[in-house]
Amino acid sequence: GESVGLHLPTLSVQEGDNSIINCAYSNSASDYFIWYKQESGKGPQFIIDIRSNMDKRQGQRVTVLLNKTVKHLSLQIAATQPGDSAVYFCAENYSGNTPLVFGKGTRLSVIA
Amino acid sequence: GAGVSQTPSNKVTEKGKYVELRCDPISGHTALYWYRQSLGQGPEFLIYFQGTGAADDSGLPNDRFFAVRPEGSVSTLKIQRTERGDSAVYLCASSLGVNQPQHFGDGTRLSIL
């Protein structure tokens, strides 16, 4: 199938290590943020979201951190597995404007 | 339960032809979105429906692009007089409502020869 993100920044991580993927968002008015995982030939898959009244949210093996002061979002993946290899996108929007605005994406490559 | 379903998964057609792309959202989701994704880029917004009406079509690139959702469920994206620059993956997403997670289908890969 068609590859996603042939020229994206790449993060290479050893299996079992923790991964941190960063995203700088564009709109200081944004109040809702989502991380998506996209595998080749597939649509974006929802991972975790966070609203602007929080600065941290945890899921299963994933944590999202939000720093509104510097407009920065990060996704932490604990004990990275080969199945985590994909392109990761952050997305933002704000109340009253529903379309998501996606960041450029980061390719995560897990080395077994 | 079924996720967002898009058909066809691949479409190859000649420049100048008309194409229709279909999206079946998750049952019960009132909001439906169309995005377009080019190689190496994140998805870009095209149009959003709340129920049957297009609440925001500001992302449609020109009047060759049109979308409908007549019964508030299935949506069709229509492209007239296709151009080579229209080649991309067209993604559909649905959500329970505004500022709720949008869940995506696997897209239609459109190739204009």
Image (spheres, rainbow, N blue to C red):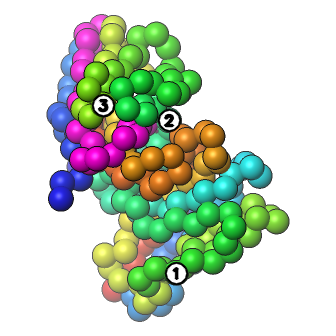
Residue B27 lies in the magenta-colored region = yes
Q: CA distance from mark 1 to mark 3?
A: 34 Å
Q: Which is in the foreground here, disc 2 or disc 3?
A: 3
Q: CA distance from mark 2 to mark 3?
A: 19 Å
Q: What residue occupies the far right of the structure in this picture? A: A69
Residue highlighted by disc 1: A58
Task: Using the image, tell me which numbered label, if any, was put on residue B72.
Answer: 3
Amino acid carrying mark 2 in the image: Phe
**Residue at image coords 18%, 54%:** B2
Is residue A108 toward the left or the right of residue B25 in the image?
Answer: right
Of badges 1 and 3, the one in the foreground is 3
Residue B9 in picture, x, y percent from top left: 19, 39
Could you tell me which chain the residue with mark 3 belongs to? B
Which sits in the foreground, A86 or A6?
A: A86
Give the residue pinned by disc 2.
Answer: B45
Q: Are marks 1 and 3 on the same chain?
A: no
Distance of label 2 from label 1 (alpha carbons): 28 Å
Rendering quarter of residue A46? bottom left
Mark closest to the chain's N terminus, 2 or 3:
2
Does A88 sit above or below residue A99?
below
Picture coordinates of residue A67, whole percent (x, y): 74, 70
Q: Amino acid at mark 3?
A: Gly
Image quadrant containing the C terminus of chain A:
bottom left
Q: Secondary structure at mark 1?
A: strand
